[in-house]
Amino acid sequence: MVHCNYNLSLKGQVKMFFRTFYEIRGVLMKKHDKSLFQIGEVTKIMGITRKTLLVFEDMGLLTPAVKDEESGYRYYSADNMTQIRSIRSLQQLGLSLKEVQDYYYDTENIDTYLERLMELRAALDRNIQMLQVRSAKQGDLTVRKTTLPRQVCFSRQYVCENVGDAANVLRDTYIAAARSGKMSKLGRMFTMRMSTQPDKLDLMCCIPVEDSFDGPERMEFAETPALCIYYRGPYEGTTTAIRALMAYVKENNVETTGPFRNIYMEGPPNRGENKEDYITQIAVPIK
């Protein structure tokens, strides 16, 4: 306790108080390694609030390297800083603090948290893909690397005379898949070019369905690396992008592992009759 000397002026008493305060703080700091950080330093470095640190501590996610019981001062180590960064990274992925707590300490249900993180990663991949889609410009035939997801599809093969005929059979396949009661709400429908001739419309129409679908139309596709072009424009022009991707594969001696795919990203449902803004991902699986 700091005792006031009433023989001193008020100004003198204030000076004495702060001198005593800094002397006490200096003694406390000397007790601890100079490599430790005070709570104010941590909040500044990590860009978080004091309240957030205390919440981490209350939940058992973070234990200060040193906590002075007399003063209540907390001191944090480099390992503590790493732990804070790890917690924040998991939060930024979309986990709540309760989920972060379970992730660290509930070892019996680790598969549940692994599945949750895989779902978050898939959502992030979809968001990245949609940004790439939105950035597609007419005439841009840039070849990109991507990953085609594992999918189970309701699939039917047709030989079509023209693009209009292809749109009709794709719609018919979609309706049949919907009536199976197993259609996936996440995957995107696509067609595979079963012929090596880009102008020939020998198509396998594929509508994503749930894993539990077991009808004769079931086809399963493994996750695979791929090359792709995001083509913006009417479906009649997708052959241009297919030819460009074929040329890239040939010029760079890329080994493909399956037929070329037209994956329908944005079309009549969200672009109406504005065909110039249709976006199709032209992709080919590679080794």
Image (cartoon, grey):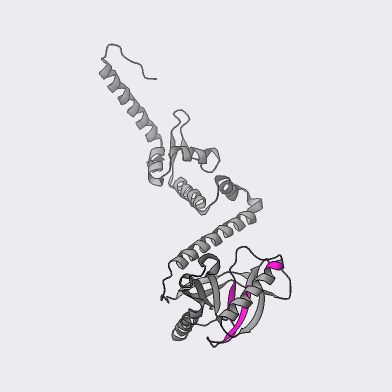
User: Residue 139 is drawn in which quadrant?
Assistant: bottom left
Q: Percent x, y for residue 63?
A: 51, 41
User: Residue 170 is drawn in which quadrant?
Assistant: bottom right
Quarter of the image for the C terminus: give it: bottom right
For image coordinates 53% across by 52% down, the residue present is 94
Q: Could you tell me if residue 253 is visible in this image?
A: no
**70 is within the stretch colored magenta:** no
Q: Percent x, y for residue 17?
A: 32, 22
Q: Give the farthest residue toward the top.
A: 7
Start-end of magenta stretch? 178-206
Closer to the camera in the image, 266 or 119: 266
The mark tally for this picture is 0
Using the image, determine if residue 22 lies above or below residue 131: above
Q: Give the farthest residue toward the front.
A: 273
Q: Percent x, y for residue 54?
A: 49, 37
For image coordinates 59% across by 86% down, the residue present is 161
Closer to the camera in the image, 161 or 21: 161
Quarter of the image for the N terminus: give it: top left
Q: Percent x, y for residue 182?
A: 70, 65
For image coordinates 27% across by 11% down, the residue present is 7
Using the image, determine if residue 160 lies above or below residue 29: below
